[in-house]
Each structure stands twice: as structure tokens, then as C-alpha cells.
Amino acid sequence: MLYENRWAKAWLGFGLVWFLAAIALAPTNKLYQQGMVVFFWLPTLGLAWSARRVYAQAWRRQPALWLGILALLAWGTVTLLWSNAEDGPREAKRLLYILVFLMGFPLLAQLGIGWIQRLLQLGGALLALAALISIVHFYVMVGYPLTERLSGIGEISHPILGAYVVAAAVLWLLYACPRQRGLQLAWAVALACLGAFVVLSQSRGAGLALVVTVILGVLWHRDRNSCLFALLAALGTGLAFYQMYDLIMLRGSSYRPEIFAAAEHMISQRPLTGLGLGSYYRVEALGHVFDHTHNMFTHVAVELGLPGMLLWLAVWLFALGEIVRARHSAFGKVLLGLWVFSTLAMQFDAASLTATPRAEWFISWLPVGLAMLLPWADDQNRRCGKIAGSI
């Protein structure tokens, strides 16, 4: 089959790394989007027919997840009928991008979960490099004081959303300590760069979500390393809070309770239909105007109504169900941590579910896509178990 060729697997594998790392390292957002087309969407579409048996297996093994996704995308398309979006066809095309992005993961599963984990680690290492470059550029070359919120390079320039991307990379690197001494040093340096980025971004939402996830990780990893990481996270958080107390408390609650209340009022005005996919809106709270609701679920409810929010919630919970079934595996444990982190992160700022690939995809569509790999991971684990039992 065409999708089984090495060049096809290498093409898609490079596309995954591009998605993970080029968000920071690509010179422009346009180049990043063009790279996604060339390295991920085109090979996925080109290989789709030859891989129809793979998609049949994906549907048979995860019917609820796929049905939820298709229903959400279909409802989003329907809401274009009353949306005030300037370019309705463009909004519909973005939904197609999401579908093609997710279709790439059953194909990626044919590489083997071991290779997927290596690609994630490579992407995390490149993001660590981007974090280091960001810190050096912002504080050394430009000369901002350390009290200034870090603005990274590329598409991680937003202090909050950039911190979400980098914190997600921490989670898939943290529990992948290599055995070789030299690689262990590189692993520790990469984590230090990523952690420093999160701290210097002063993103309380990303920091809190990361720390809580690492501490809760003891419940599903259940080993000495996870206990050590949880202890270090708690101690590091206490130290950072002590050293940066004034900076942390300076912004107060950042109007989040007031924004949430205003978003609830907007939802109550059009609970069934929402404003429509891609609609322009603003949130007013205490005399201030905000671009969005600073919460993924309320944002979806404002745009797509309560039906859209419930469909997204269903997709998210179906992904959790797949992850929980794989919690016995190392990859499943990492995904469970990423899901918990993403769920917490969605509450504070993320508000872009259907736009082109961007930082928010790291806490929305990436966890869903990775959950689609799990049926093949189970197959590989069973084969390894049978081989081990026969020796």
C-alpha cells in the first residue's frame, strides 16, 4: 500500500514535527501555514484512498470519537447560515483543515508508537531551542528587565498562548528521560529552558495548569520519578511565588470572573444558535472590551451555541475515554497528563477552536489527534506481550 512506503511515513513524520516546532521556529506565520499544507495536509489527502482500510479500522475502533468530530464540524458549517463572518467559505475551509489534520493521525500510527514518541521528543527539543532563543533575544539582545513578561519568537510571542505550547512540550518530555548520560544532560537542559520560558512568561494559567498536572501525575504514573517531579514542581512553585509575589498579584484576577459573567449573558441571548462560526464579537466587562471570552467552552458556546459547546465537550470526553483505556501504557499516561493540562488551560485564555493551526491547537486538536493513535498502540503492546511470553 502507498501509505506503507517509507517516503510516505517520513513525509508525514516530518509534517508532525513541523506542526510542533515550526510554530516557534518558522520565520512567519504564513510560512508555518504553508508548511502545514505541504508537509501534512497534502500527504494525508494523497494517501487517503490507499489507506481506506486504515480509516475503516479507525472508525470501527473509535466510532464515538469520530462521530462526535463529524457532528461538531457539520454543526459549525450549518451555523455559517447566520454568521456575520466576512468570508464564510474561508471559515468552512478551516473546518476541512481540522478534519484533514485529524485524518493524518491514523496514518501516523502506522509508523509505530515508538516513532511517534521520538517525533514528539524531537519537537519538544526544538521548542526548547526556541525557548532559549526567545529568552536570550528578549532579555539579553533587546535588553528588557527580568520583570518584563517574556514575548517569544514566532507564534509563541503571546505570553499566555506561547506558555501553553511550551508547557505542553514539558509534559511529553518530562517522563521520557533517556538512559544515556549525555542525553540525560541534554534532556535536563531542554526542560530547564522550557520551564524558564513558562516562568518568565508570567502566565499564571499555564503555570498553574502545568504544576497541578505534574502533581496529579503521581496518581497515574505511580513511580519514583513522578513523585520526584511532583515534589520539585511544588517546591519550585513555592519559590517562584515567594520571589515573584508582587508580579503575580499585580494583575489580580485579570477580569476573568467578570468576563465569564458577561460571556454567560451573551450565551443566554442566543443559546441554541450562537452568533455563528467565525462571527466577530467583543466582550464588555467593567468598562473594558475584550477580544474573546478567555475560555474555550464559553467561546464555543458564544459562536456555536449550546449545541456546539456540548458537541465539543462530547469530543473532548470521548478522547478522554480513549486515553483512560490506554492508561496502563507509557504513552497513555503521557496523554492523560496532556489532557488534564489542556482541560485546565482552556479555562483561562484559549478561545480559538476552528481557526487555522495555532497555539490553541496544542491544547485542543493535538490531544484529540494523539488519542486517535491509541488503538494501534494497544495492538503493538499485545504483539510485544505475545512475543515476550513465547520467549
Image (cartoon, rainbow, N blue to C red):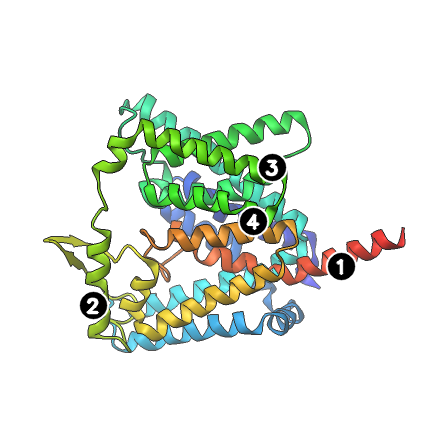
- Per the image, the residue denoted by label 2 is 266
- Give the residue type that dot 4 points to: Leu
Q: Residue 93: horizontal and vertical position, in percent?
A: 39, 66
Residue in front for this viewpoint, 157 or 307: 307
- Per the image, the residue denoted by label 3 is 225
Query: Disc 2 and disc 1: Cα gap in Å?
Result: 50 Å
Q: Secondary structure at mark 4?
A: helix
Query: Disc 3 and disc 4: Cα gap in Å?
Result: 12 Å
> Which dot, 4 or 1, sits closer to the camera?
4
- Give the residue type that dot 2 points to: Met
| Residue at 52% from the left image edge and 62% from the top image edge | 320
Residue in front for this viewpoint, 83 or 177: 177
**Quick check: can you spot residue 191?**
yes
- Give the residue type that dot 1 points to: Arg
Residue 219 numbered tag: 4
| Residue at 55% from the left image edge and 56% from the top image edge | 370
